[in-house]
Structure formats: C-alpha cells, structure tokens
Amino acid sequence: MSKKPTSQPALHKVIMVGSGGVGKSALTLQFMYDEFVEDYEPTKADSYRKKILLDGEEVQIDILDTAGQEDYAAIRDNYFRSGEGFLCIFSITEEESFQATQDFREQILRVKNDENIPFLLVGNKCDLEDKRKVSFQEASERAKQWGVTYVETSAKTREHVDKVFYDLMREIRARKMEENKTSNGKGKDKNKRKKLKCTIL
Amino acid sequence: MTTIRHTLQQEVFQPNEERLLAACHVEKLYKKKKASFLCIVSNTKPPLTISLIQIKQSEKTYKRKRSWNLVELKSVDGKNVLADNLEFDLHLDKLYRWVASSAQERQLFIITLWRQSSKYFLKEKPVFKNVPETWIREDVLTPENKFISSPILTLENDITEDFKAITDKEQEDLSSLMANCEFAISNAEAFMEVLARDLSLLDGENVQYLLASEAKVESLMNLLESAVDEADKIEQRLDEYDEILCHVKETMEKMEKKNSMISTVNKNNILLLKELEIIIKQLDLPRKFQDILDDADLTNTQGLKQAIEAGNALRDAMNCQLDPALLRMSAVQEQRKKFEKYKDKFSRAICRQLNNLFIHYGNHKGESDRNTEGLVLPQHSMVHKELIPYTELMHWIKIMDRKASEALKKVYTDSLGKLYDRDVHNLFEAAKEKIAPLGQVSTPTRNLALLGLDREQWTLEVISDDRQRYEIIIEQVLTQLEPVCLQEQQFCVTFFQLDILSPTSKNTQTTLDGMGAEVNVLPSKKAEKQVHEEVRNMMTSLFSCLEEELLSFIGYIEKYDPFHCMYVLVHLNQHVMSAQSSFLSNTLASVLIHMKRTLDRFMQLQIDSIKDCKIARKSKCGILPYVLNLEEFAKLADVLLKSDRRIDLEKWYIRLVDTMIEFINVHANEHHKTPPQVIKMENYHYLYSLLSQLKISVLDNQRKEAKQKYNEALAAYVTHYFGRPLEKLNIFFEGVQAKVASGVKASEISYQLAFSKQELRKVISQYPGSTVKKGLESLYKKVEKHLSEEGLVQVVWRAMQEEFIRQYKMLEDLIQQCYPGSMIALEFTIDDILNFFSDIARSH
Ligand SMILES: Nc1nc2c(ncn2[C@@H]2O[C@H](COP(=O)(O)OP(=O)(O)O)[C@@H](O)[C@H]2O)c(=O)[nH]1
Ligand SMILES: [Mg+2]
C-alpha cells in the first residue's frame, strides 16, 4: 500500500551564478521558503535541497547559491563542474552585472565543455523598472546569441521566480533523457552517464 | 513748697493777672540737675484759659521758660500706678519726660491736670495713662481728697460750683411784684406786711376749696362701691354658664369615642368578610373538577385537557396564600384533607400513565432506518412529541408530589437511558467497523511511528488516504451526537422543568409537599450552577455510556494510527466549541482532556525516541533518522498546528526540536567513520533548511540556532580536516614567528641556525608542486567520502580552497619579511594552485 522510499526521486543540480548583489540568494530563498530578505548579506556558498512536483513527477532540486565575487575564478571551477544547469543572473538596474554574465558564461562552457548545457539568462529586480539600466532588448539579444532563454524576474514580488527554476529543471530533465537515449552511442562523459543511470529508474 | 508756690504766685503770675493752680518741682528724665517748676495756671480775666508753664529758677529770680495752652495737651502718661513713682510724661507739642521731686506733688499736679482738662475740654480730652484710677474719677474731689487741695483751689471751687443765678422768669415776676408796690423799695416792712396778708388770704381760700371737694368725693366712692357689687354678680353668672359648658364638652367627647369604635367594628367586619370570601374562593374546588380528579382519564386529549384544568385548580387551591393562623380553622383543615385525598389520587393516576408511557417508549425504534449506509445516531423526536402533552401534568407532579416526580424521572432515565445506550453503542460499533473490519487483524503500528527510528522502519502503515478516512469517520460520529443530545436535553429541560429549581426545604405552614420554586431564592449564579448540574446529571444518566464508548472508539483508531491524537484533538475541540448541548459540550471536553494527555504521552515518547536513537553502522552517517523524519512528522501534525489548539502542540514542538539540536551534538560522536563535525554540519544544515520551509513561528529561535550551529560545524570541519597540508612549512614558520615575538628582528631571522636559508630551502624542497597536488586530491576525496550530500561538498571544498590560498599567502608574506632578497620561494605558485583546483574539478 505505502510507497517505500527506496526509489529516490531524480535529483537536478542547479547553480546560481552572477555578480554579487544581483539577487541570487534572494531568488533562491524566495523559491525555497517563499520569503524575501530585504537586507544584503554576502554569501560564500550555500546549498539547498527541495522536493517538488515537476509536471506530476516528484523530483528533488539541489540549488547551490554562490558568491560570484571570488578572488580567483578558478575556485568556481569545481562547483560549475558539479552543476547540471545554470541560472545566470544579473540585475537590470546594474550594467556591470550584465557585462559580467559574459565571463560567467565563458567559464561555464569551458568547465562543462558543453555548448548545450541547460542555462537561463535571468534579469532580476524587474520590480525596479524606474531604475532599469539594461534594456529587455539588449539582454534578449545576448540570450539569442547564446542560444538560451532570457527571463526577467523579481525576487521581491516573486514574479517568474518559479518559472526560471522549473524551466531550467525541464531543460535539465530533457537533456538527461536525451543523453540516456544516446548513452549507448557517443557519450561525452562516461562518469556522468553512469550517474544518470542510477538516478533515473 | 508752699512758700515757693506763694513766691511764684506773687512774683511771676500775679503781675500777669494769672492764678497758680498747681505746681510741681521737676527734673527732666535723664537730664538731672536741671530743675524747674511745672505750673498749671489760669488767667483771672475772661476768656478763661488754662496754661502749663515751665519756670526756671536762676539765683533768686524765676523766669518763664516755656508755656503751652492746656488745649495742646494730648496725653499724660503716669508710667505706672505705684504710689512712690515719680516719673510722668506729658505729650504736648512733643513728648516731655519728667521726674517729680515728690510723689505728693506729682499726684496733686496730675489730679489738677485731669480736673482742669475734664472741665474745659468737652471733646478730645487728653488721655491719662498709667495713672491710679482714683485720681481721675469724678468724685476725686470728695472731701477725703480735699486735704490735698490747696486753699486757692478750694476757693475756686466755691465760686464756680455753689453759685446759682435766679432765672429770667423769676426775675421778671419779682420785678412785677415789686412794681405793684411802689413803696416796696422805700418801705420794705410795709411791703412785707402786704405780702403776709395776701398769703393768709390765699391760704384761707385754699382750705375752703379743699373742704367743698370732700363731699363730692364721698358720693363718688359710693357709686364705685355699687358698681363693684354689680360686677361680682355678673361674674357669678358667668361661672355658672362655664360649668354647664364643661358638661356638654365631656358628653361630646364620649360620643366621639363611641362613634370611632363603631366604625372600627364595621371595618373589621368588612375585612373579615373579605377574608372569608377569599378563603372560600381559594379553597373552593368546583364539583366538576372534583369528579375529574376522582377519576381522571389521561388516555385521550379531551380527558387530558380536563385533567390538566382540574389539576391546576387543585394546585391553586392547595397552594393559596393563607395566613398561618387561618390554617387552624377546622373548616380549612377539613377542606385541606379533602384536597389531599384528591391530590393523592390524581397523582397516582398521572404516575401510572406516565410510567406506562416511559416504559413503552424505552423500546422505541428511532426515526432513521438502521440499514441505510452511513453512520447515524437515531433521533427520538416522536417520543418527545407524544410526551409533550403531558408536560403540564409532569410539572404539576413536580410541585405537588416531589417523591412521585423523582420516581418518574428515574423511570424515564432508566428506560430511555437503555435506549440511548443501545443507540450509542451501535453507532460506535458501526464506526469501528468502518475504520477496519473487526475480524481483520491489525498489525500494531504504535511503536513504529517514532521519530528516533530509522526512516525505513518509521514509515507508517497508515497511508494518508486511510488517515483521511479516519478523520472523516470521527467527524461524522461527532456530528451525529450533537442533534440527538441537544434534542433530548431540550426535551428534558422543558418536560421535567429542570430549569426551575425545586425547593430544598418543605413549607411547614401548610401540609403541602411543595410551594413552588419562588420560596427559596438562591443567588442567581448559584442557581444557574444548580440548574446546569441538574441537567447534566439527568443527561449523564441518559447517555451513561457515551464518554466510555467515545474513548474506546478513539482507542480503536489509535491502534491503526498513532498520529490520531493530532486530528482527533482538532475535531473534538471544534465540537466542544460548537456544541449547544451543555451536556455534550462537557462530555466532549472531558474526552478532549483525555486526548490532550494522549498527545502529551505521544510527544514524550517521540522525545524519548530521539534520545534513544541508535546510529546505524553505515559507511556514511548522513542525516540522522529523527532529523529526516521531522518533515513527515510536521506534515502529520500540521492539522493540529493550524487549529485553535495549536498551543498544545507548539510547546511540545519547541521541546522536540530543542532535544534534536541537543542530541545531534551527542550522536555526532557515535559514528564509527564519519567525523562529528560532518555529522553536525549536515544535520544542522538539514534541520535549518527544514525549519525554514516549515515556517513554524514558535520554532524561529531553533531555526536560527540550527543555522549558527551549522556554520560553526562547517568552520570546525574545514579547520580540523583541511588542517595544514604544508605541515612542515607551517611548523618552520611558527618557529620563525616565535623568534620574532621574542625580539629577534625579522631581517635577522636568517642568521639563526635553526632558521637559516639553508634550513628553509630544505623544508621547501619537501613540498614540490606534485606532492601538494596529490595532497589536495586526497583531501578532496576524503571530503567526498565523509559527506553524504553533494551540495555541501561544494560548500566545504570552496571553503577549503580559500583556506589553502590564505595559508599560501601567509607563508609567502613571511618569506618576504624574513628572507628578503634571498630569492627563495615556494616551489609552486598561486597559479599552480589554481590549476590544481581546476584539475581536481575536471577529473571529478
Ligand atoms: N527590489 C528588489 N530587490 C532585490 C531583488 N532581489 C534582490 N534584491 C535585493 O538586492 C540585495 C542583494 O540581494 P542578494 O540576494 O543578497 O544578492 P546576491 O549577492 O546575488 O545573493 C538585497 O538587499 C535584496 O533585498 C528584487 O528582485 N527586487
Ligand atoms: Mg548571496
């Protein structure tokens, strides 16, 4: 009668990247606990885990919220490596944070060595329209160029918060399914494939 | 003194035509030796003035020094009234203070001053202070005092006081008299003779007049006497009349008394009549009623109506308010006896009828069909409807025959109680069957729902569908109870008049059994309480098995669902609050208390299970069972946490989570492989995250505490396990730092034997890049092995990378400081390190 918790739900690992102060932690906390923290407390790295229903399927999301302002970018290599999908966040009120997304994108591609890694460009703080510095147009163009989706969010009003996480997880899931199908063929990463096999039952 | 006064008169005053009245030899106070004479002087020619004159003596001559008019004198102050006092003050144009040379002179001087001033000043007499009273009295000049007056003074008195001039009129008469006698002046003797003759003539005439008037007086006297006699007679008459009138008055008074007595008697008669009328009216029971009472037919509506009417009439007659004294009247007594007989008979008839009915209805089926599905507690409104017509009779019996009424009540409760017992029992049996068929063997799950047990074991047999079903069933059962209890309670209250208090003592004035509720008045609070108690007692007898059955039912659920206390509490509480039947509300409340105890026991067991938790011998410890189980637990407890009774749970939640926080720390030391810091870090992290998700407000402090403990454990793990991959370098530089601290200059460290450049190179050579890289790789593996959650591996590794870079930089700095220009450096650069990190990342 009862569901034995022997089969663990699929685990999707999401990394939050972006400059300091753009709202990575705020988005994570809003998604996790439905709360918005007004005061700014710089993060080093925090890990979150939550069970959710993704299109009727119970999955587990692992979110790694990072600092984005490390002295040495190489320190990020390890956790970029561990991520299966990325939310690359900037603040629409800050031009520099938008520019920084370029570096983050490059580092991720380098570490993951994968052009099609699940990735969303996120323009946060869209509630502060009157302070906007980065136009929707500009950000959309960059996303198009990268071949990724651009979404504007507000951690404060919760606008599109669920959307970015769910969309990213769908991408991750789709990616995994695809890899699973072609796993007999030319998998790029043997290690990874083995892991995926364990997860999807 | 006399000679001096004489000399003064002769030499000073006489030449001025003045007269010395008094003189006093004085000195000025405080200026002795300047002696002079104070004199009171009057002039001898009109207008009369009195002066005060001070005379000074130089050799043999006297000179005026000062003089004042007596009018100027404002006051005289004698200083005191002693006889030998010599001082005195005169207030003239200013104050003069004197001392007399002799008391006698002073006295005489002051007296003279007083006398002169009283004589000559009509207004504004000077004030005489501190002078003996006797000196300034009017009679101060009586002969006794005269001895002190001087001869001159006496003379003055004769002149002024004894002379009386003849009046003008007298003078005129005298002159006309003398004019009549031209010779009067010339011949006084002849004139006298004429006068004498005239006088005797006048005398004679006078006598004659006197004699003539005497006779007239006598006749007048006679007249007066007769008048007095007449008056006496009249007086006598009046006395007689007076006596007669007194008689009349007495008679009148007597009549008045009699009159009032008659009216009193009259009034009394009327009152008596009224009283009698009342008695008769009250105690009269019409023939018609007597017949009915004698043979009451209570089986049909018509008979019932008549019986009620007759019964009420009897009750009124028996309960009428009579003076206790009247009860002694034999007629009244007789009537009462008669009534008593009717009462007994009627009461018996009612009892018989109601008894039959009660017993009959004890077998009532109930309105609802037992066979329909669902849980139903049948209502018995038909019974109530059929009994309602007897309500008044029941009330009658309650007043008239307490014992019979109590007996009836008992029959009712016994009979209907059995009915309800059966109904209630059936309801709960049906409910139990719905929880689980009785035949089915239930696996005891009670012990499997403890937080401290392993996740696999802890999994409840009850799935949420079942639990939802239990919740619906208990709600249905509770909902069934309310209308039946309320209906029964309302019926009992009206039918047995439970809301009207029965007298606790008999009224001894009458032989009646009761006199109605008004007789003893209880304070309303107390009365209300008593009413409630009556109602509750009756309902408790009627539903005697309800509480027991409910508890047994709940116990039955417990067997299938140890978490039942959460929702049962919630539903019970709702029904306690909403129940309109006070009995049901009370009963449910008592079950609620029972449930609350069950909850307390349950929670205590949970806490104990946390303490007793056994750590599984797995390769990684991971999240402890109770931390893992808390999420599921919270889900099950949510129903209670969202209800009005959340406080019951909240205080337990605090204890529960406090216990977890405490025991994570304890259990962290019990795993054979995983280090305690990791166990703490992972579990506090998990607990913090879970509490953030649950948002149980009372646990906010615990949430913060968990976060803090997580951070502490993380820091402890990094420092402890990352430790010092460059151990020997560290030890070397610790020595360097110790030297610096003891006073050796940084630049001279290299001259110390133990810390020479040579030594440094030796140590550095032990850490070539490849070794360092290997060390870091094995450290990463160790971390991966310790931790159960990949997310935290990233967090920890990041912290370790930072720590390593920090240590590297510190060493570089020390080399720069202590071995400047020596060109010595570590065998790997920061870029090397970053490459190591990237390689580790890629190889993973
Ligand atoms: N108005 C507004 N403020 C935001 C939003 N997201 C974050 N913030 C604020 O921006 C500051 C930095 O956010 P934080 O999440 O700590 O940035 P992080 O460094 O990227 O983690 C905080 O004060 C947040 O309250 C948003 O969507 N709207
Ligand atoms: Mg942050």
Image: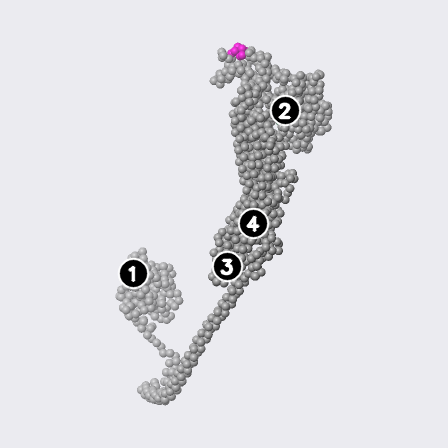
**Mark linked to residue A8:** 2
Q: Between marks 3 and 4, how big is the CA–CA gap?
A: 27 Å
State which tag comes first along the sequence, 3 or 4. 3
What residue is drawn where x is 58% and y is 56%?
Answer: B296
Where is residue B330? Give x, y as percent.
48, 62
Establish whether ligand 2 lies closer than 8 Å to the Cβ of label 2.
Answer: no
Q: Between marks 1 and 2, how big is the CA–CA gap?
A: 136 Å
Query: In this figure, which residue is indicated by the disc labeled 3?
Result: B337
Q: Amino acid at mark 4?
A: Asn
- Count neighbours of disc 4 (C-alpha within 10 A) and say few if under 14, some if 14 to 19, many if 20 or more: some
**B834, above or below B345, in the image:** above
Q: Between marks 1 and 4, how big is the CA–CA gap?
A: 123 Å
Query: In this figure, which residue is indicated by the disc labeled 4?
Result: B355
State which tag comes first along the sequence, 1 or 4. 1
Where is residue B21? Give x, y as percent.
31, 67
Q: Amino acid at mark 3?
A: Lys
Magenta stretch? Answer: B756-763
Of the 4 image quadrants, the one containing the N terminus of chain B is bottom left
**B188, above or below B353, in the image:** below
